[in-house]
Image (spheres, helix red, strand yellow):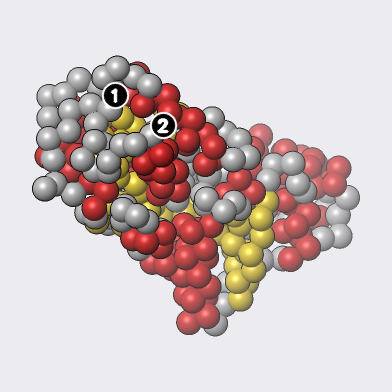
């Protein structure tokens, strides 16, 4: 049986207008009333997709605070630029906000009153729940959750291509430096790494997989992980890093240790940020069309024909440069 606004009004003792304002996250309500309505809606199984929403004229681009760093900016800045350009072409206003679970995100949305929300990168489930309860159309960029529209690069294929390339250059002790596997993108890149080893009939060695701990200085974590790998005997002869910032930090550690790249150790990154081609030696990387990623996220929100959540995947490409060149 379909749960209606009238059903929620009876269940909560609120007027239909109050229930409607609470579901649409509109101002003018006390937080206790709003929470009571939303709690009843979840318990009774109300379909938030039934809310009557007007044309999308304002989109809020949300970036998690953990991604608002020097190491992440070379990736997410082009994504934001692509989203902004797509909005400009469509006559839509885009606002940019950095958020975290510790901040009043629901109040931010009520203050700015966007018609739709575009989330970039990893978001905790509790934070996604707050955004879902706003009743606004929501799309995820570089993240995947069941029941939500999302657009992602082919992370799994990228990890596979990077590792297969290193195998084909004759490397046999291929290490991987990753971040938290709770992140969809990182988890998929790690799966691609292991799949390439499996297809080459090479045993995956857990000792060669190191996660950089979450912290304020990802580069320091990458350097510590690289030193740990280089202290092994025998040490790795190749390194796949989950992003370019990590790969560049790892490469500097290798060079400082007197190793030659790629003669002693080959290195491949991921994302193909601008600094990859400018590095010495230039860094091999998995290239993502980051502007297209942001534009595709906007297109998901503006697609009126999409009644059900849609999942899209963008292609990736291996760019081979001197850091892993096979002589």
Label 2 element class: helix
Q: Quick one: 116 or 205, which is closer to the camera?
A: 205
User: Is there CB contact under 8 Å for labels 1 and 2?
Assistant: no
User: Residue 284, position in %: x, y?
Assistant: 28, 51
Report whether 61 appears left or right of 280. Answer: right
Q: Secondary structure at mark 1?
A: loop
Q: In this rendering, is residue 319 above or below 124? A: below
Residue in the picture at 40% in, 62% down: 274
Q: Within the image, what quadrant is residue 191 found in?
A: top left
Residue 288 makes an appearance in the image: no
Report the side of 94 relative to 222 (left or right).
Answer: right
Q: Residues within 10 Å of mark 1 (few under 14, many from 20)?
A: some
Q: Quadrant of residue 288?
A: bottom left
* Disc 2 residue crowd, few under 14, some 14–19, many 20+, Cα 10 Å: many
Residue located beneath label 2 in the image: 226
* Residue 244 in sight here: yes
Which residue does the image show at 36% across and 41% down from the upper left? 255
Seen from the viewer's position, the closer of residues 308 and 177 is: 177
Q: Position of residue 113 (x, y in %)?
A: 72, 65
Residue at position x 43%, y 28% from top?
227
> How many discs mark residues in the rendered view?
2
Residue receiving disc 1: 235
């Amino acid at each position: 049986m379909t749960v209606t606004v009238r059903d929620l009004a009876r269940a909560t003792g609120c007027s239909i207008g109050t229930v409607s304002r609470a579901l649409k996250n509109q101002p003018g309500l006390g937080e206790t009333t709003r929470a009571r309505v939303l709690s009843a809606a979840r318990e009774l199984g109300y379909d938030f997709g039934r809310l009557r929403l007007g044309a999308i004229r304002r989109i809020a681009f949300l970036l998690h605070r953990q991604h608002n760093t020097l190491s992440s900016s070379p990736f997410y800045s082009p994504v934001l630029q692509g989203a902004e350009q797509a909005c400009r072409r469509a006559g839509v206003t885009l606002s940019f906000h950095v958020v975290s679970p510790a901040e009043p995100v629901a109040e931010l949305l009520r203050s700015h009153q966007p018609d739709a929300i575009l989330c970039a990168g990893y978001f905790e489930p509790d934070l996604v729940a707050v955004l879902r309860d706003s009743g606004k159309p929501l799309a995820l960029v570089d993240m995947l959750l069941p029941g939500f529209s999302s657009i992602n690069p082919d992370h799994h294929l990228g990890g596979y291509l990077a590792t297969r390339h290193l195998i084909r250059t004759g490397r046999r002790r291929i290490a991987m430096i990753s971040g938290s596997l709770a992140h969809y993108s990182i988890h998929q890149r790690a799966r691609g790494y292991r799949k390439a080893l499996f297809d080459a009939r090479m045993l995956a060695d857990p000792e060669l997989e190191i996660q950089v701990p979450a912290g304020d200085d990802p580069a320091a974590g990458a350097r510590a992980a690289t030193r740990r790998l280089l202290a092994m005997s025998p040490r790795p002869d190749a390194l796949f890093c989950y992003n370019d910032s990590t790969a560049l930090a790892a490469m500097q550690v290798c060079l400082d240790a007197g190793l030659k790249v790629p003669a002693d150790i080959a290195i491949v990154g991921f994302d193909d940020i601008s600094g990859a081609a400018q590095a010495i030696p230039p860094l091999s990387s998995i290239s993502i069309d980051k502007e297209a990623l942001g534009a595709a996220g906007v297109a998901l929100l503006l697609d009126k024909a999409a009644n059900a959540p849609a999942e899209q995947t963008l292609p990736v490409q291996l760019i081979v440069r001197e850091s892993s060149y096979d002589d």
